Each structure stands twice: as C-alpha cells, then as structure tokens.
Image: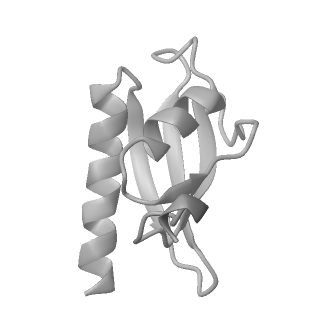
Amino acid sequence: MVLVRMKTIEAKIKQVLNSNGIKCSSVFWMPDPDETRILLSFNSKENNRLTTTRIDRVLNSTGMGDFKVPKEFQRLSSAFLHLEIALGAKTEKTITPEAM
C-alpha cells in the first residue's frame, strides 16, 4: 500500500514540475523511517535558469503536503543537478487563531 502511494506521489511530482516548465528527469522515493525523502534529478542543460526557490514554490502550491526544499542543488554527476527534498505529513489545513 505504501509503495503504491509513493509511486503515485512520484508521478504527481514529476507531472506538476513538468507542467510548470521544469523538466524533471527522474523522481525517486528514498525509504526512511523518520520522514519521506524524495530525490529529484534535473538535466542541467534543459534547466539553465532553474532555482530551488522555484521548485519549492511549485511543489508547495500542489496541496500534496509540506515540502522542505534545501537552498542548494547537489551535483552527483556532470550532466545532472540533484535535489533531495523532504515531504511532511500535512493532511489538514492549519487552524488559524480567528477560527477558534
């Protein structure tokens, strides 16, 4: 069940990024007992103006959860930029003090 859910999230992340003009080469879920970690891979030649701030804004506007995006890319190879993000379990909207 968890694996199917994570495959769905991986596909949704890739689709959302691509629909916002960010060409994402791959999305990998990395099993971790403490938090949901996802590795994103981008071809550096297809995304020459890509920023982590833009990725953060796009992912956090999806309503899928609270994404924590680091400030810098990691370069694990010469052709690709990599970004390890964390997905928090945000299932309910935040209650504002006015609503209480």
In the picture, the quarter occupied by the N terminus is: bottom left
x and y percent of residue 27 in the render?
A: 42, 51
x and y percent of residue 69 in the render?
A: 64, 47
Q: Is residue 11 visible?
A: yes
Residue under the image location 34 percent in, 25 percent down: 20
x and y percent of residue 57 in the render?
A: 52, 34
x and y percent of residue 52 in the render?
A: 64, 32
Q: Is residue 17 above or below residue 76?
A: above
- Relative to 11, is 50 on the left or the right? right
Residue under the image location 45 percent in, 65 percent down: 29
Q: Is residue 79 visible?
A: no
Task: Count the numbered circles shown.
Answer: 0
Q: Is residue 84 above or below residue 50?
A: below
Outermost residue, right side: 71
Residue under the image location 68 percent in, 43 percent down: 76
Along the line of sight, the residue nearer the viewer: 63 or 56: 63
Q: Quadrant of residue 26?
A: top left
Q: Quadrant of residue 34?
A: bottom right
